[in-house]
Image (cartoon, grey):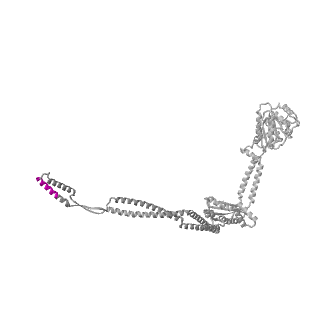
Amino acid sequence: MNSSQHTPRSRTRITSPKAAFAVLERHARIAVAIASLILVVATLAFLFLPRQYDSTTRMLVRVGRESMRPDPTATLGPTIGVTQTRKSELNTEATILRSLDLLQKVAADLEKDPDAQQRIVSALERKLKIQVEEESNVITVQYRAGDPTDAQKTLSSLIDEFLVARVESRSTPKSTAFFEHRVGDVATRIEALRADLRKQLDGIGAQSLDEHKRALLARQQSLETALAEAEAGISISRARLDRIDASMKGLAEMQVLEETDGPNPSRDEIEKQLWTLRLQFENSRATYHLDTPVMKDLAARIARGEETLARLQAPRQLVRRGINANRQRLELDRISERTTLAGLEAKKTSSATELERTERQIAALNTHEGEIVELTSRVRLLESERDRYLAALEQARADVAMNEERISNIAIIQEPTLPRAPAGPPRAWILIVGVVLALSSGLGSAFLADFFDPTLQIPSDVVNRVGVHVLAALPKHRCLRAPISRKLEPGDEVTLTNELRREFGFVVGHLLASDKKTTVVSVTSPVDKTGTSTVAFHLAIRLAAAGVGSVLLVDASDSLTNLTRSLGRKPTKTPQAVTHNLHLLPRWIENCDATTLMSAIEEHAASANYVIVDIGSTTTSGPALEIARRSDQTLFVLSPRADVAIAQRNLRILETHGVKILGSVLNCQELRIGAQP
């Protein structure tokens, strides 16, 4: 067997109703005691707990000035957005109702004695119930007391003090005087700054800086525009004069007004003379030769006449002259344009002069603008500050007036009630809870006691905590603890109960697996009084009854309650018949060594198929360990009284000496040898 199996392990879980009932049976006393105690306490509470009465009032928290606006002193400087939900507001009111200062004021109103006041405060802290109704703006306040009148009176005093305390908590002391002082101080500073500002404005000849500056800038812009327009007009006017002068250069002062055709007396006279000369030439031609002087003279005269006639126009032209209208119009335009040019030049000169003066004024304004702007800004800031203080002052005065009249958003929709019937304690529930708690506590205590039980009560305890397999378990049971009515005599029959036959049947089954002619099985335990003799006897009875052959039961124990004494036999060195197929080899000598015992066992074992040796405890008997080592199998007997550490140590000693452990038997009963149920 592995030594690691000997380490303690946790108790096995309860996995069946049978195991649970076994636990309850083992710890029935504890379960019944605890359940009885709880039932007694519940009964006493049912009979003697004093009656309690609840007085209830309800308040409606409306949306009012307390919800919509902050305190005046909180709005003077920079502020941040704070979102307050209705739930938080209702919780705030509930917190004020629970405040210790408020409870102490209520106690002072009800009692004058300090000790009585302290008791009232303690009772209010314990019995005052404040509930914010879901999905509503209603707060329910309930107070429980032993007397209905006291409950109503206490709750009424609490509500009155709450309304007063709420007004005090929502107001800021001396805020009105503070704001009045601040308004006066800021007004004085504004007047001083305004005087300085007036002095600066008078220095630049202005009533208002912004208006004066706007006027100067507008004037400057207008003058610059006028100057630019004048310069442009001058340029245009001069260009027009140049064009007029150019146009007048080709025009005379006088011009032909009318030309007509008429008779030309000179031409007519020359034509007559020419006709006359031509006639003379033709007449002389018949007389004279062309080369004659007369003819040449006539020809020359005719040529000169024709020449003169050619130079003269045939009709006479009559011409009427007068003043040139175009030149006259151009001269008038030139005079007008020169007048316009002179006006534009005068306008330019005046605009330039006025613009220069305006720029000087703007420069002077810019020199003092910084100081004026600073003074104006300071005045505006102080005026804004004064306005805030004035608004806060009005709000503070209104708050003081409303607080004095106790005007708030709290409305009492139900006055404190005078209870008629007791509200507690719930007597029926006390009994029901007492019974349920008694049952659950009894069951729980049984399982808890089983969990912390250091003894070995069930086979799983042996397997998990000692580390050895369990072949048989003899539980505590009424039918297995019947007293002995007589001692066994030779030839008597012993009948085992069904439970004993079943449990020892598992051991017999393991022994039948041996192919030896004679199988020696030693029965041992870690300590005395664990029932090794009882187990050895019942195992021998079960083997004999199974018909597997002859069984020899050997008493090798040093215990005072060994087999020899229990069966009332005399110590002899020869086996004595007990029942059919069962013989007993008594303990014939005290303090016998292992060699002598084994020699006697081997001497009589030849006639038996199975030898069951009761060697008692291996820690108190010297030869027991040697006999166990020389046996074919060893049965380890444990009882609930066995110490787990001693059992583990004894088991390791057996394994160290080469003892073959068949298994273990858990003996939880106090069955005597030969007892008949």
Where residue 121 appears, x then y in whole percent?
Answer: 72, 63
Where residue 324 appears, x then y in whole percent?
Answer: 31, 62
Name which quarter of the figure residue 537 lies in: top right
Which range is magenta? 273-287
Residue ranking furthest to the front: 293
Where residue 362 appears, x then y in whole percent?
Answer: 52, 63
Q: Is residue 284 magenta?
A: yes
Q: Residue at x 73, y 54 (%)?
A: 434
Q: Is residue 665 visible?
A: yes
Where residue 263 appears, x then y in whole percent?
Answer: 20, 61
Total numbered circles: 0
Name which quarter of the figure residue 666 lies in: top right
Q: Main secondary structure of the magenta part?
A: helix
Split into 4 quadrants, where in the image is the C terminus? top right
Split into 4 quadrants, where in the image is the N terminus? top right
Q: Is residue 677 visible?
A: no
Q: Is residue 458 magenta?
A: no
Give the camera-side residue of 609 and 273: 273
